[in-house]
Amino acid sequence: MSAINITNVTVLDNPSMFLKPFQFEISYECLIPLKDDLEWKLIYVGSAEDEKYDQVLESVLVGPVNVGNYRFLFQADPPEWTKIPDEDILGVTVLLLTCSYLGQEFIRVGYYVSTEYADDSLNLEPPAKVLINQVRRTVLAEKPRVTKFPMAFNAPLANEKVEEDANNTSNGSNLLPVDAS
């Protein structure tokens, strides 16, 4: 069982022009108190051919998180379109919303994003150079792909010493006898 469950993600201002910020309303529940922050990231996949074109649009820390229900607005600038190969600006790509705890990703929500000209005539006869001010993006919010990764929340790390209970005043009477035969 996960300590964090995403209960809803709403993509706001969708569809939108390419150069406008992304906005998500994220709702989640926390089932056990977490000492450290959650890290939420939004990643735009610039090209299916090479991850060097992926762009982290925003990364925010939220926490520490106590037991309860939470909701926040996550806003991120659009990708730097000049860092995307020209042939990959229009078409279909992927947007990833991830959440990590103690540097370990435990959930990823993937969305397909369709980018095309807002003017149908430009889609029928695209100009040689992309007119980025005319490009519209649509996040296919109805069909997210959710991937969960196993995570031991609040488990001691390998370099973290587990402290013994200060109230343990055992005199050895609870030890099992050793067979000395």
Image (cartoon, helix red, strand yellow):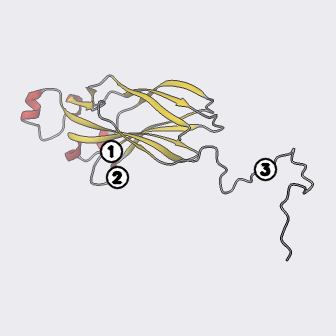
The mark nearer the N terminus, 3 or 2, is 2
Nearer to the camera, 77 or 43: 43
- Which residue is disc 3 drawn over? 163
- Label 2 belongs to which residue? 51
In the picture shown, does residue 72 fall above or below 33?
above
- In depth, the one of 131 and 118 nearer the eye is 118
Mark 2 touches mark 1? (CB < 8 Å): yes
Going 78% across and 50% down the picture, which residue do you hit?
163
For the residue marked with disc 2, what is the amino acid?
Glu
Instruction: From the viewer's perspective, tell me whether residue 142 is left or right of residue 6.
Output: left
Q: Earlier in the sequence, mark 2 or mark 1?
A: 1
Residue 89 in the figure: left or right of residue 6: left
Q: Earlier in the sequence, mark 1 or mark 3?
A: 1
| Residue topped by disc 1 | 45
- Front residue of 151 and 62: 151
Which quadrant would residue 21 be assigned to in this image? top left
Query: Between marks 2 and 1, how big is the CA–CA gap?
Result: 7 Å
